[in-house]
Image (tube, grey):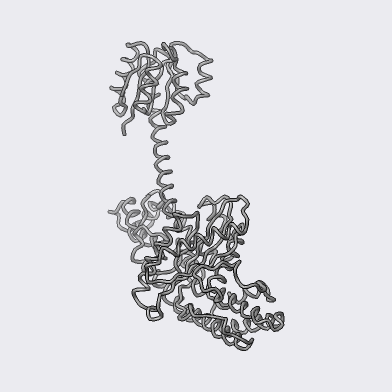
Amino acid sequence: MSYKLIIADDEQIERDKLKLVIQRELPDVAVVAEAKNGRQAVQLGIQWQPDMMMVDIKMPGLDGLQVVRELSQSLPHTKFVLISAYDYFDYAQEAVSLGVKEYLLKPASKQQITETIQRLTSEIEQERTRRREEAQLREKVAQLLPVVEKELALLLMLDEETGRFDTYAQLLQLKEVKGFAIAVTFHPETAAEDDSLAFNVNKHRWYEKLRSKVKEWSNSLVSPLLWRQMAIFVLRGSQAEEAYSSRVQAIKLARRLCGLFAQEPIRLQFGIGNVYAGFDGLRRSYQEAMLAVKDPSVPASVHHYGDLPLCEKSFAYSLEQEKALLEKVRLGKVEESVQLFHCMLDEVVRSARGDMRYVRRFLLECVTVVSRVAFEYQLLLEDFSRFCVEDLHSPAEVRQEGEFWIGRIARLMQEERHRRTASVLEQVKQYLQQHFAEEIKLEEVAEKFGISPYYLSKLFSQQGQITFIDYLTELRLEAAKRLLADPGKGLKEIAYDVGYCNPNYFSRVFKKKTGLTPSEYRKALLE
């Protein structure tokens, strides 16, 4: 590692002495320039951007402290050494205030010069390492941000109760959360294309196109594509804005997005919720957007919740009942789900007093909310795009239609839970057993198996009784124990062979899990 140094002293003999000592004793330090006065020192400092500058306090023009003062802003990483023939206490005080840590009193010995420069190079190397690590961390965080964004949007879609919202907001640097949701559903132009391979392949391309333009045209969080549905959470500033103006801007954005696909064999529908503050507000906006996107009374592609037909938008059943219904459906409890739906419907029918608009709106909201469970697990709801409530003219018809959809979604979840519990976790474990020595991330493994990182983490914790990271660590350490039985293998080599890029970190993890360092474990094993 080489270091650039500039010497600034008005005495030629002093410059030559310093340069000679440095060239003989410090081969890694290159004297790139010499200055005869303070003004020249400033110019050369800006030109060369040195790692270190040795500056005489008393020079013509600018003195040493003035040089440091002028360069400290433009050269924040440069280390300064002040040189003087006198022990000026006042100068030393100001030098400390400018961040100067080293001071040489003329005539300085070879040892003093060498030790001073060595202290500075050691400090510079530590700072370089820290900056390099910080840059790597920033790069990793930048790579992680799209994953965090999708995970946050997914949690808002699924109405999950979680304490991670604040953590995600901090990572995404969201100081104030306020905005509205847009629910988007993808439909083929004709029924014949509904299950075509081409449509299912192209929808991912269309999703990426939509996501790219949304990020370009707005400050937003964009969810993953769940079967044929996605969510956009458009974030607004904290300034007050009229509801009508907000609605106009939201509709304008949705129509602009819709126009991107005018020449594509796809029909998009956009549902828009109202503007609210906080994560609870965004979840409420998404629920409104889901109601709007499924509203059958408006034939247009863009629907705003505020434009739904005037009727009661809250129902007789409680929020606790809605959450209980979602949980029963998520757990695949078919009979209990249908029974609870009947209880909720009975309350709504009593409150409606013969107003079928109110009853139909309840069914629309109830089935829409429950359908999110299917989307969460990426289940195929055949013909769900044709779900419609406008042709239902009696509570009995609403009951029959609701029982069909609630029971169907709960049954799909029942089948899916059995299938996933039995296979996905084992498949992931087998994959980790084969690839533990590689760089493995939860998000990449989840994507490989077509599930969300949140669900994979949950699967390990609930079904495997161990976290994803702990399971991966166990695999790596078991392999390391086997390799430690071979005295010909070095500890660094073993660390790399089992997936650790940092041997020191490997040793810390090994000792934490086994109570012994790798060296101690090998010694005990071979005795």
At 58% from the left edge and 83% from the top edge, which residue is drawn?
Answer: 402
Does 399 appear above or below 147?
A: below
Picture coordinates of residue 153 (x, y %)? 51, 62
Classify the position of the C terminus by image quarter: bottom left
Q: In this orientation, does residue 466 appear?
A: no
Nearest the eye: 449 or 297 = 297
Q: Residue at x 43, y 24 (%)?
A: 71
> Nearest the camera: 7 or 195?
195
Total labels: the figure holds 0
| Above or below for 389 versus 203 | below
Residue 473 is drawn in which quadrant?
A: bottom left
Residue 509 placement (x, y as % from top left):
44, 54
Asked if residue 98 can be seen in this view, the reply is yes
Q: Nearer the viewer, residue 165 or 462?
A: 165
User: Which image quarter holds the N terminus?
Assistant: top left
| Residue at 59% over, 84% down | 338
As displayed, is residue 278 above or below residue 298?
A: above
User: Where's residue 412, x and y in %?
Assistant: 49, 81
In the image, taking residue 305 as reference, residue 491 lies left or right, namely left
Q: On the picture, is 41 further left or further right than 289?
A: left
Check the image and report above or below for 27 versus 230.
above
Q: Tell me where residue 117 appears, x and y as whole percent.
A: 38, 25
